Image (cartoon, rainbow, N blue to C red):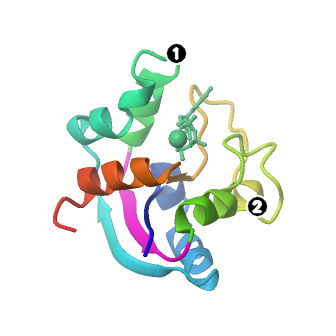
Amino acid sequence: MERTLILVKPDGVHRGLSGEILRRIEAKGYRLVAVELRQATPEILGRHYEEHAGKPFYEALVEFMLSGPTLAIVAEGQRVVEGFRSLAGATDPTVAAPGTIRGDLGRDWGLKVMQNLVHGSDSLESAAREIEIWFPEL
Ligand code: RTP
Ligand code: MG
């Protein structure tokens, strides 16, 4: 059975949207394997976002992800990696389709980095790598 790593980013936790986002994951029919509220660290984020190191938004992204607690989730189901990306919607919440998490709940706040509520692994390989980073015990 496929698994993916989902994060409710600090903007989502701060706005009180953790429950709504968990609700959508469960309503779609995916099973929650792990859910943990935790403060990210520079070490975890360095590994999680290693593909973005050196990009213009990298420093602001890490600063944003350190700004408050993150809800880390592992969800399971057939094609859940692709399925959660579909639930999340496009990266930019202004253009994300209504009906998606980012499209319904996100917007542009005019900040240094895009705050788009959630992260979801983008491939099976990323999912395995990211689950190992956030939940090495799984
Ligand atoms: P994620 O990794 O968070 O699921 O999002 P994604 O695949 O849709 O986006 P990705 O390209 O992997 O970028 C990672 C996160 O960096 C922030 N970002 N901001 N120009 C910007 O302001 C910008 N570009 C990227 C977003 O928070 C994005 O989700
Ligand atoms: Mg990504």
Q: Position of residue 53 (x, y in %)?
A: 39, 21
Relative placement, left or right, of 135 versus 114 is left
Instruction: Specify the quadrant of the image occupied by residue 110.
Output: top right
Is 105 positioned to the left or the right of 61 in the image? right
- Left or right: 6 with respect to 44? right
Is 129 rendered above or below residue 2? above
* Residue 56 spot, x, y in % from top left: 52, 15
Any atom of ligand 1 within 8 Å of the CB at mark 1? yes
Q: Which of 21 and 13 lies nearest the eye of the viewer?
A: 21
Above or below 123: residue 53:
above
Q: Which residue lies under the disc numbered 2?
A: 104
Q: Residue at x 41, y 22 (%)?
A: 59
Query: Mark 1: few, some, or many residues within 10 Å (few <14, many ≥20)?
Result: few
Does the magenta segment cover residue 95?
Answer: no
Do the CB atoms of the residues marked 1 and 2 lie less than 8 Å apart? no
SS assignment for the magenta stretch, majority: strand
Q: Is residue 19 visible?
A: yes
Q: Residue at x 44, y 36 (%)?
A: 64
* Residue with the mark numbered 1: 56
Q: Residues within 10 Å of mark 2 (few under 14, many from 20)?
A: some
Amino acid under disc 2:
Asp
Q: Is 132 positioned to the left or the right of 110 in the image?
A: left
What secondary structure is marked by label 1?
A: loop
- Magenta range is 68-78
